[in-house]
Amino acid sequence: MRLLTGVQASGDLHIGNYFGSIKAMVDAQNRDDVLIFIANYHAMTTVQDGDRLRSLTRQTAIDFLSLGIDPDRSTLWVQSDVKDVLELYWILSSYTPMGLLERAHSYKDKSAKGISASHSLFSYPVLMAADILLFNSDIIPVGKDQIQHVEIARDIAIKFNNAHGDILRIPEFRVDSSVATVPGIDGAKMSKSYGNTINIFDEPKKRLKSIKKIVTEVVPLEEPKEFEGCNVYNIARLFLDKEELRDLQARYKTGLEGHGHFKLYLADVIESYFAPFVEKREYYLSHLDEVDAILHNGAKKAKEISAKTMQKVKEVVGI
Ligand code: ADP
Ligand code: TRP
């Protein structure tokens, strides 16, 4: 089974990103053929500062490698290193009805808010279809917001195949419903855009500051506390096994400790969970040549797949 995903380089990763998507990709490497690319062409719809895009792109690659994407088992590359995607994007544009794009949320939501959309935002789903169809992907693991984009890719592929025969593999999306939404420090969905995140690679001191801001009930120290519904507990449970969870529940019930103690405990738990990743990241940050070589090699492997698709596609469209 081939899984493919594109990641937008968007800065600091938080534990919602990790438990909501990255960990599933890392685990999938044991079973599936995993392809991951840094979607830097896509990022251009929002980032228009060259230095910033370059640094975010590399940063994202380093973060994914540090969090367990294994370049010996998976293929990791930067989108713009495999130019076939742009050619397929253009070819697919001729098989994409305007109405399909006019209905896409990415464009519709922005225009509804009165924000003037660029052509790249409008045609973004076609580029995403090219990303997916170029590599004969079977499964596209996505968050709910991306389902429509995969459906558009399917529609385009079906139209293309109706015209030319069975050339493009029709992909399926997969939404992992077992992954609960990770709450942020205010209890709402953890998200960069809400400013309620706990970041994976923050310095421990900075992370502790975020953890101390977790909103909790006000209960006198000596009274028992509810762990159910507690934001500290709900974040901690992601990291703990059954026995550790039971111990933590007992600490809530005894009423000898306050939420401040549980926050310090959470900070320790998070720090030790991510310690090996932090160490790996430090390694990559001081071995940037190695990172570039991994990405170069990933692009080479990706091109071997894309070249085969392009050969078939160009043959039938006549270029
Ligand atoms: P953000 O909301 O911080 O901008 P993104 O939209 O870039 O995060 O999400 C990247 C990936 O992380 C997506 O697959 C998304 O489903 C997942 N993700 C983000 N926040 C959470 C969360 N709080 N809980 C679970 N998954 C999340
Ligand atoms: N649009 C996706 C996002 O914003 C990123 C992306 C680009 C992608 N191309 C893709 C995801 C192909 C899956 C498959 O998160």
Image (tube, helix red, strand yellow):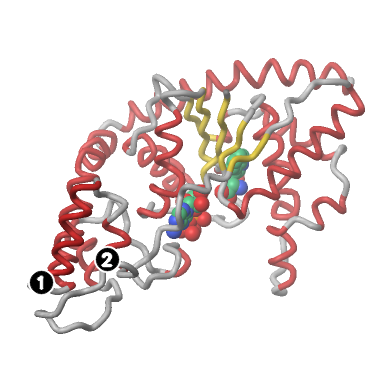
- Counting residues from the start of the chain, the first of labels 2 and 1 encountered is 2
Q: Residues within 10 Å of mark 1 (few under 14, many from 20)?
A: some
* Near-viewer residue (158 or 11): 158
Identify the element where label 1 is drawn: loop
Nearest to viewer (mark 2 / mark 1)? 1
Q: Is residue 11 visible?
A: yes
Q: In this rendering, would 239 be left or right of 180?
A: left
* Near-viewer residue (118 or 315): 315
x then y, percent, for residue 289:
33, 28
Q: Which residue is mark 1?
A: 257
Q: Is residue 132 above or below residue 146?
A: above
Q: Is residue 13 above or below residue 95?
A: below
Q: Is residue 50 visible?
A: no
Residue beneath the point at 76% across and 44% down: 152
x then y, percent, for residue 310:
74, 21
Q: Is residue 287 above or below residue 318?
A: below
Q: Amino acid at mark 2?
A: Val
Q: Amino acid at mark 1?
A: Glu
| Image quarter of the N terminus | top right
Identify the element where label 2 is drawn: helix
* Near-viewer residue (306 or 133): 133
x then y, percent, for residue 35:
52, 29
Q: Which residue is mark 2?
A: 232
* Near-viewer residue (56 or 143): 143
x then y, percent, for residue 170:
74, 30
Contact, mark 2 vs mark 1 (Cβ under 8 Å): no
Q: Quadrant of residue 61?
A: top left
Residue beneath the point at 60% across and 37% down: 140
Residue beneath the point at 60% across and 20% down: 303
Q: Quadrant of residue 121?
A: bottom right
Q: In this rendering, would 159 be left or right of 116?
A: right
